[in-house]
Each structure stands twice: as structure tokens, then as C-alpha cells.
Image (cartoon, rainbow, N blue to C red):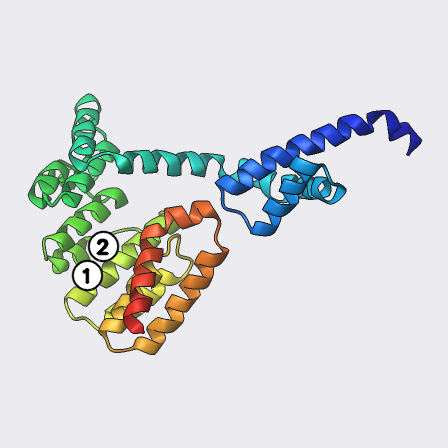
């Protein structure tokens, strides 16, 4: 212990700095209140409990979030910035990107934006070259085209394309495909929709399948089953990281609206 004596002021200052950094991070990412109290004591008062809390927060929260969440956070920020732009501006930028580089992703991105703007015919025209080329069976093309078919009230065509998607491509592709397929089946009044929604919820990469299945159950007059799913979503939201809540905000908001509808 005596050998550490000369270094104690340095250790104390490092921990106090970590408390300040941790407090900023906790506020920015909306961590639990007890972390903020501990870090606040460490940053402002330099109390022993606050400094121990700063060390704990650094290793339990700060470092894991920086290690595992940097890329995802960057993508979320980029999506958030894009979302602030008017849709027509984003469409013009996507058109410029496509002019500069006619890639599958650029063409699919432009088609998705045109569809969101209520211009499904333009979106279909943008996507059409891919449907007749070497990318005709690519999951991105099939999923984008199926979404357009649903927007144009053509669920049978959407179902046909979705049945061609290779579900082994990725977990995200599987989730999106089965969710859209369930919607297409529901739009046609097919009994398969229920089972497909349930399949979509298995190992899902997003909250969308659960939110849409709850809406489906309410429409079917199965409110209690829907309530169970919506309560599970509420628990997930309360325990989720701020990043995940932002990413899934649309579906958490949809679930909140459905819960109000059931009251």
C-alpha cells in the first residue's frame, strides 16, 4: 500500500476524469438514474463511492458501448441526419448517387424512397432493370419489389416474389421476408398469415414482426393475445439500450398506439 502512496493523487485525478466523462456519457445515452448520482458525486465531490462508481461505470458500460456500438451508433446517427432531410431532397441525392454509380444498392435505395414518397410507378420503373437482369433473384431486389407490390395493392405478386427469397441469406433478410410475406397473405385473406407472422418473430432482428402481429391479432378480434405481445414489447423497450430504442422507435410507437387501442 505504501508503494502506491506516491501515485494516489494521479489515480484520484484519473478516476475523477472518468467520472466526468462517464457522467456526460450517461446523460447523453439516458442511463439509469443511479449511475448519474454515483458519477455526479465522483465528478463534483470526489467522494470515494463516486470514484468507485466511475471505475465500475467505465468497465461495465462505457467501454462495452464504445467497443460494440461505435459502428452501429455511427449508422444510427447517419440515418437520423438523413431522416431530417426533406424526402424530395433525399430522392434527388439518391438520383445523383445512381447517376454516378448504377449499383444494385443505389437503385434499390432510390426505389424505396420513391415508394415512400407515394410514387410507386416511378419506383417500379427504377427497379425494373434489376428485375430483368442478373440481380432478378437478389434478396434486396425481391424485397424492394415485393414492398412496391404491397403498396400498389398487389399482394399476390408480392407473395410470389417473397417465396423466391433465400431465407438463409441472413437473419435480417429472413425477418423482413417473413414479415412482408405474412402481410401479403393477410391482404389476401389467407389462413397462413398467422403462422408466418409467428415464424417471423423467431430470432427476429427487429421489433416489426411483433408489432405487426399484434395489429393482426387485434384485427382478428384476439385482443388478449395481442395484449401479451404488446406487454412483452413494453418490457423490451424499458430494458433496451438508447440506441436500440432509437432504431426500433417506429415499432415501439406502433405498439404504444395499439396498447391504447386495447384499453
Viewed as shown, does residue 13 lie left or right of 257? right
| Residue 84: percent from left, percent from top | 27, 36
Of mark 1 and mark 2, the one earlier in the sequence is 2
Q: Which mark is residue 162?
A: 2
Q: Which mark is residue 184?
A: 1
Q: Residues within 10 Å of mark 1 (few under 14, many from 20)?
A: many
In this view, the mark in front (1 or 2): 1
| Residue 20: percent from left, percent from top | 61, 34
Can you tell which quarter of the image residue 260 is in?
A: bottom left
Instruction: Check if mark 1's residue and mark 2's residue have beta carbons within 8 Å.
Output: yes
What is the quadrant of the C terminus in the image? bottom left
Can you tell which quarter of the image residue 71 is in?
A: top left
- The answer to whether residue 202 is above or below residue 222 is above
Q: CA distance from mark 1 to mark 2?
A: 9 Å
Q: For the residue labelled by badge 2, is the local secondary structure a helix, a strand or a loop?
A: helix
Q: Nearer the viewer, residue 131 or 45?
A: 45
Q: Residue furthest left?
A: 121
Q: Residue furthest front?
A: 45
Q: Residue furthest right?
A: 2
Amino acid at each position: 500500500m505504501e508503494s502506491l502512496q506516491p501515485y494516489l493523487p494521479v489515480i484520484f485525478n484519473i478516476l475523477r476524469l472518468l467520472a466526468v466523462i462517464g457522467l456526460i456519457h450517461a446523460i447523453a445515452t439516458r442511463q439509469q438514474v443511479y449511475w448519474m448520482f454515483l458519477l455526479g458525486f465522483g465528478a463534483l465531490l470526489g467522494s470515494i463511492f463516486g470514484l468507485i462508481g466511475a471505475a465500475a461505470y467505465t468497465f461495465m458500460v462505457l467501454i462495452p458501448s464504445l467497443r460494440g456500438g461505435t459502428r452501429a451508433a455511427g449508422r444510427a446517427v447517419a440515418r437520423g441526419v438523413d431522416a431530417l432531410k426533406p424526402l424530395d431532397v433525399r430522392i434527388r441525392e439518391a438520383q445523383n448517387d445512381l447517376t454516378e454509380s448504377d449499383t444494385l444498392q443505389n437503385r434499390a435505395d432510390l426505389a424505396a424512397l420513391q415508394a415512400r414518397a407515394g410514387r410507386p410507378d416511378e419506383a417500379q420503373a427504377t427497379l425494373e432493370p434489376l428485375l430483368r437482369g442478373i440481380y432478378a433473384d437478389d434478396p434486396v431486389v425481391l424485397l424492394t419489389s415485393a414492398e412496391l407490390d404491397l403498396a400498389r395493392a398487389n399482394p399476390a405478386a408480392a407473395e410470389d416474389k417473397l417465396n423466391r427469397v433465400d431465407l438463409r441469406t441472413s437473419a435480417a433478410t429472413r425477418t423482413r421476408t417473413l414479415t412482408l410475406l405474412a402481410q401479403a397473405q393477410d391482404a389476401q385473406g389467407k389462413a397462413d398469415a398467422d403462422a408466418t407472422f409467428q415464424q417471423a418473430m423467431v430470432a427476429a432482428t427487429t421489433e416489426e414482426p411483433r408489432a405487426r402481429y399484434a395489429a393482426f391479432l387485434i384485427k382478428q378480434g384476439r385482443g388478449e393475445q395481442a395484449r401479451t405481445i404488446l406487454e412483452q414489447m413494453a418490457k423490451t423497450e424499458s430494458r433496451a439500450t438508447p440506441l436500440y430504442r432509437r432504431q426500433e422507435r417506429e415499432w415501439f410507437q406502433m405498439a404504444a398506439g395499439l396498447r391504447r387501442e386495447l384499453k
